[in-house]
Image (tube, rainbow, N blue to C red):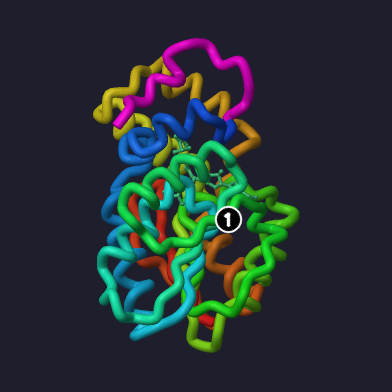
Amino acid sequence: MKTDTLFTKPISKQFEFDADVAAVFDDMLVRSVPFYKESQALTRRFAINALGKGGVVYDLGCSTASLLLEIERSVERNDDIRLIGIDNSPAMIAHARKKIEAYGSGIELYEGDILQFPYEKAQVMISNYTLQFIRPMVRDSLIRTISDTLNEGGVFIFSEKVVSEDPKLNKELIDCYYDFKKVQGYSEYEIVQKREALENVLIPYTMNENIQMAKNNGFKTCELLFRWANFATFIAIK
Ligand SMILES: Nc1ncnc2c1ncn2[C@@H]1O[C@H](C[S@+](CC[C@H]([NH3+])C(=O)[O-])CC(=O)[O-])[C@@H](O)[C@H]1O
Ligand SMILES: O=C(O)C(=O)Cc1ccccc1
């Protein structure tokens, strides 16, 4: 796994999921998202709970398809389950395809925009750390599309970076997160460079805004599955 050193030099552009990011992505996520593996394991568990013996699962913003591969490893081979990954980054899809082929996986991958994709009815929709990159003015309509895609009782599991409603607490959450990054081996310089690259690209909501967004757009319930400082995982039920 290649180490993320992308922000050891001055940024030349805003953050994007290009070939450089894709090449270090797995390292970047483990070292930049607190409890990334744990939130993936929770997502996998609650997705499988919702599937029973069959159904369609979409991962919106699947990146290198790590989560779909985890789910595939965890279900019975004869279960009638379709695993579908969507991502609009050619570099991410290329990395995902290499992994799928290497594991002899049956996962279906599509390079496309999750805002425009022609979804088939599904039992599980997943979108971890992706909605935060979707412009706020179209985020609600995406959640509505996701709920329209789900069968009754289907689940939408999503993880996001979050902000606090309280400015003082928000500052403390950010400091806590940056201390986490330092423990992961990122320098102050890298942390600042990445923060600048992500400005107006990663737009987080509060925990309550995320929950209300789901309830306003077709979900009868939305609850917190997990939270650490300014990262959270939610489950919404159709
Ligand atoms: N409109 C869009 N359409 C399709 N893909 C998009 C769009 N916008 C962004 N993406 C894709 O969404 C992914 C966000 S990363 C998800 C991590 C993964 N879920 C994981 O749990 O490992 C989050 C992160 O790196 O923090 C990238 O692969 C983008 O190309
Ligand atoms: O908010 C940050 O500083 C991050 O690094 C979040 C993040 C994590 C992984 C990929 C892109 C952004």
The span shown in magenta is 1-15
Three-letter code for the amino acid on which mark 1 is drawn: Tyr
The residue sitting at the bottom extreme is 152
Dominant secondary-structure state across the stretch colored magenta: loop
Number of labels in the image equals 1
Q: How far across and down, in percent of the image, does residue 167 sit?
A: 52, 42
Residue 201 is a magenta residue = no
Residue closest to the eye, 220 or 128: 128
Q: How far across and down, in percent of the image, does residue 54 sit?
A: 40, 83
Q: Which quadrant of the rendered structure holds the C terminus?
A: bottom right
Q: Is residue 152 above or below residue 63?
A: below
- Left or right: 102 in relation to 133: left
* Rendered residue at 47%/71% (across/down): 57
Residue closest to the eye, 72 or 231: 72
Residue 5 is a magenta residue = yes
Q: Is residue 234 visible?
A: yes
Q: Is residue 18 above or below residue 223?
A: above
* Rendered residue at 49%/79% (across/down): 123
Which quadrant of the structure image shows residue 68? bottom left
Q: Is residue 198 above or below residue 9?
A: below
Q: How far across and down, in percent of the image, does residue 99 sit?
A: 37, 46
- Left or right: 128 in relation to 3: right
Q: How far across and down, in percent of the image, does residue 188 sit?
A: 38, 18
* Rendered residue at 58%/40% (across/down): 90
> Label 1 crowding class (10 Å Cα cut-off): few <14, some 14-19, many 20+?
some
Assign a secondary structure to mark 1.
Answer: strand
Residue behind mark 1? 110
Residue closest to the eye, 127 or 108: 108
Q: Is residue 205 visible?
A: no
The residue sitting at the top extreme is 9
